[in-house]
Image (cartoon, grey):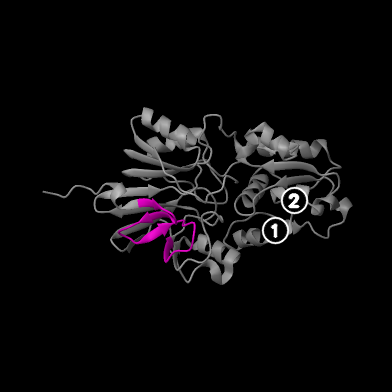
Amino acid sequence: MPLAAPRPETWIRATPAGLYCEPGDFHIDPSRPVPRAVITHGHGDHARPGNGEVLATPETIAIMQARYGDGAGANLQPLSYNETLTVGEVGVRLMPAGHVLGSAQVVLDYGASRVVVSGDYKRRPDPTCLPFEPVNCDLFITEATFGLPVFRHPPDDREIDKLLHSLSLFPDRCHLVGVYALGKCQRLLALLRRAGYEAPVYLHGGLLGLTALYERLGVALGPVLPATGVPREALKGRIVLAPPSAAAEPWSRRLPDPLVAQASGWMRVRQRAKASGVELPLVISDHADWDELTQTLDDVGANEVWVTHGREEALVYYATKKGYRARALALTGFEEDE
């Protein structure tokens, strides 16, 4: 008689250091240094320095090395998408998550049981990374950054059209767009190129390194130039990308009458945009919105759903009403910013 599949809660659990897979003896996106870590992607709240053995996609390892140098990990092991590696008693496979370059879902097979840890993900196409691929599983551990029905992201092209229309309306102003250094900056560049914008885009110094890394890894982003040292007059009618905090810093005073924009899913919340001094909110997110989250639950076909780092309660309620076994998973150390 075949053995019953082990229940997920008997072999994967939340610990103070993060999600821990016991039969493989590793953590996934640990919040503190651990001996063995599987990393879903390169954002700092998921990929922290100081771990011993690190397993991730080649792109994520390159991002970690660019950010942390020797601190990226004592032993870095790349694992390409859809390849399986046995770690302890567990088969580990990385599948595209569609969040940023190199982002991955972690597929864990133990006995006859399969768990998929989503990491951060989105479902809409992104020119800078491979799209999310649903994987059937018994337990799906999903993020819920935008896990409320109010969050329904508009089409990316519509938001890019807003930016380009504003640029034509205010040719004497510089458009200063707040973006995060990993993922959002490069995606915005790619979306601008797809929309036919061929002029150089000027970058804050904090965005140059990872943008150059994307180019080295084969992601074409068109002409970019450092914004520092450019004559004020030359930036009239131009797009400048910078970290969201830069608009409030002395650095921005060199720009000609900057019109402040920001690209984020949080720009759906008008009060948040207003409080940040954003004149042109662009709702462009690297996370799944409510409809994408709920569609993904159906696509992966899991009987059980654990929800983490975000608006857990609403998605847990939705999943329970749909007949899934669902609960919130209390993991700390993950940020809301995107």
- Residue that numbered label 1 is attached to: 206
Q: Nearer the viewer, residue 322 or 216?
A: 322
* Tag 1 secondary structure: helix
* Residue beneath the point at 52% across and 58% down: 47
Tell me: 226 left or right of 148: right
Mark sitting earlier along the chain (2/1): 1
Please tell me the numbered disc located at residue 290: none
User: Can the viewer see residue 273?
Assistant: yes
Question: Marks 2/1: CA distance?
Answer: 10 Å
Q: Residue type at mark 1?
A: Gly
Residue at the extreme left of the image, as rendered: 1
Look at the image and give the residue range highlighted in magenta. Answer: 13-37
Q: Is residue 147 above or below residue 82?
A: above
User: Can the viewer see residue 301?
Assistant: no
Q: Nearer the viewer, residue 253 or 193?
A: 253
Marks 2 and 1 in Cβ contact (< 8 Å): yes
CA neighbours of label 2 inside 10 A, class few (<14), some (14 to 19), many (20+): some
Residue 157, position in %: x, y? 63, 38
- Residue that numbered label 2 is attached to: 246
Residue 126, position in %: x, y? 56, 46
Q: Nearer the viewer, residue 214 or 116?
A: 116
Q: Residue type at mark 2?
A: Ala
Q: Nearer the viewer, residue 259 or 14?
A: 14
Q: Is residue 29 magenta-colored?
A: yes
Q: Is residue 148 magenta-colored?
A: no
